[in-house]
Amino acid sequence: MAYQSLYRRYRSGRFDELRGQEHVVRALRNAVREDRVGHAYLFSGPRGTGKTSTARILAKALNCEDLTDGEPCGVCESCRSIEAGTSFDLHELDAASNNGVEAVRDLIGRAGIGSPGRTKVYILDEVHMLSAGASNALLKTLEEPPPHVVFVLATTDPHKVLPTIRSRTQHLEFGLLPADVLEEHVRWVVADAGLDVTEEGIAYALRQGGGSARDTLSALDQVVAAGGAPAGGDSVDALVESLCERDTAAAMVALAEALSVGREPRPIAEDLLARLRDIFLASVQGPLQHLTDADQARAAEQASRLGRATITRALELVGEAIADMRHVGDTRIPLEVALVRMTRPEVDTSMAALVERVARLERGFAEGGPAPSPPAVPTAAASTSDRPASTAPATAPPAPPAAPPAPAARRGRPGDAARAALAGSGARPPAAAPEDAAAPPTPEPRAEPEPTSAPPPEPETTAAPAEPEPAPAPSPGAPAASSGAPTLAELEAAWPAVLGRLSNRARARYNAGHFVAADGAAEFALPNAIHRDRCEELRPDVEAALAEQLGRPVAMRLVVGGEADPSQGPLRRSGGSAASAGEGRASGDEHHDEMAEIGDVSELDNADVASSSIDRITELFPGAEVVEE
């Protein structure tokens, strides 16, 4: 006799041999025992759960010659012929291939013809595949069949069956078998058939079956034929582990190994989706009766490692990959992209990926992990206030290399707007530093420095005379100290850095002047006498800043005049003359000082702002002629 597959060899022949469908068995056995069998039944449920086998057992029970407590005997002529498939009392129709109106009309025409047994049973498998015309043709006969006819409709998609057909039947639902029941049945089959199967092989068959008795026995047949679990059978386990470890390389290797043994990307993705569903159910304490105890424990452990946000996103990505496989030439690409996005959330810009990253951070905080370090700030861009106290410089930053004074390189001056306005009128502002030259950093305003030297304390009678206090140490980058007075070149080179040390008020007043001589005392030229008098108030601060920068005392003498730039041309303004600039000098300087101290001209009156702007122009361009239009 030819070899018969395990699921056919061990097909259930009696009600008490059915596994995992006690509610169906109880309903049908009671109906047969009490002679209350309906004229039409609808069996629905996943594949391999016993729908067709139960319909055949019902046909045996309705025609058995020695019925005992609703159970067929299995030895009479009727039972043996039904089991062998030669009985005239049982007619099976595959609605998937006979779904037209003509096939249904032929069935209806033969339904009224008698048969040797008491009841003629029609089994319509996959009834949801019937066309609309065929379903409508079956309605009348299904509602009022001949007295000796019973219809059993089987389907895996009951929602696709017409409601008019469902309403004419008794609907019995079949479910997947629990893992413990299916494992007991598999071990019994292995023992009864004398098969040599390891525990790993049984676990593989149960995992592949997923609660379906027929699929499990088919997988067991494969294990027996291969002498163990097939190669690549643990590819889904490897994929799930790579997701738990966030290891992209491991995921790619596991997928490549599964493909190398002949598996297709779509079945791999479907198996991965089913496994992720089990892990998701474990994370929410859902029903997992179709898994063994070991598989349930493993699913719970993997759920704790992944987290609900990651599991949910993985389900979505794998589902999208399965759907995209229908529209691409290479079905590997959607699955590979999904695996990369699952293992590397930072490359995924979707909202689900962001939620997963936040959930991972929250889980790390809850477990007492270290807080993520902020991004490193480049050393060159870091400010002095952001550095640790131990590394903060004690002195001002080093002075830039010697360069001619460049007033345009200083920031925050009210005269910038005036200089931009003069650009359109033909007046040329003073030459600025080249754009590619790095502007010296402007330190934060500092308090007015202490005097360069203090008078020594009065000596006591018994103490030796106090030594004079040494000269202040030069700042980093300052020229080396010498015994003579600074030269004009040294003053001009140090002046930009000195301006940066001054307060806003002093900087605003001294910004309009320049050094003209260094004969004994440093001569500093200012535009007019009023401006010179106002600068005289802050001369000690400027001398202290110069001494700190140059490393030796510097005496300043403020003068009026100096060489002006003849290329600047005349200055023009409406409604005024050159004399008005000198007349409004005092009030303009007052407003200019206010703007320097406040830092915002928005609080001043319009007239004050205008006057201060004109005064600022004359300060920036000393000696320029103001022509009335």
Image (tube, rainbow, N blue to C red):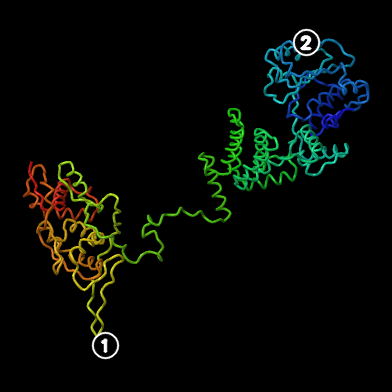
- The kind of residue tagged 1 is Ala
Please say if 210 is above or below 395: above
Q: Quadrant of the C terminus?
A: top left
Residue 593 located left or right of residue 309: left
**What residue is pinned by disc 2?**
106
How many numbered circles does the render carry?
2
User: Contact (CB < 8 A) between labels 1 and 2?
Assistant: no
Mark 2: give few (<14), some (14-19) or many (20+) Cα within 10 Å.
few
Q: Quadrant of the N terminus?
A: top right
Please say if 105 is above or below 430: above
Residue 234 located left or right of residue 506: right
**What residue is pinned by disc 1?**
464
Q: Position of residue 447 (x, y in %)?
A: 27, 64
Task: Point out the frontmost of discs 1 and 2.
Answer: 1
SS at mark 2? helix
Please say if 338 is above or below 382: above
- The kind of residue tagged 2 is Asp
Q: Position of residue 566 (x, y in %)?
A: 11, 50
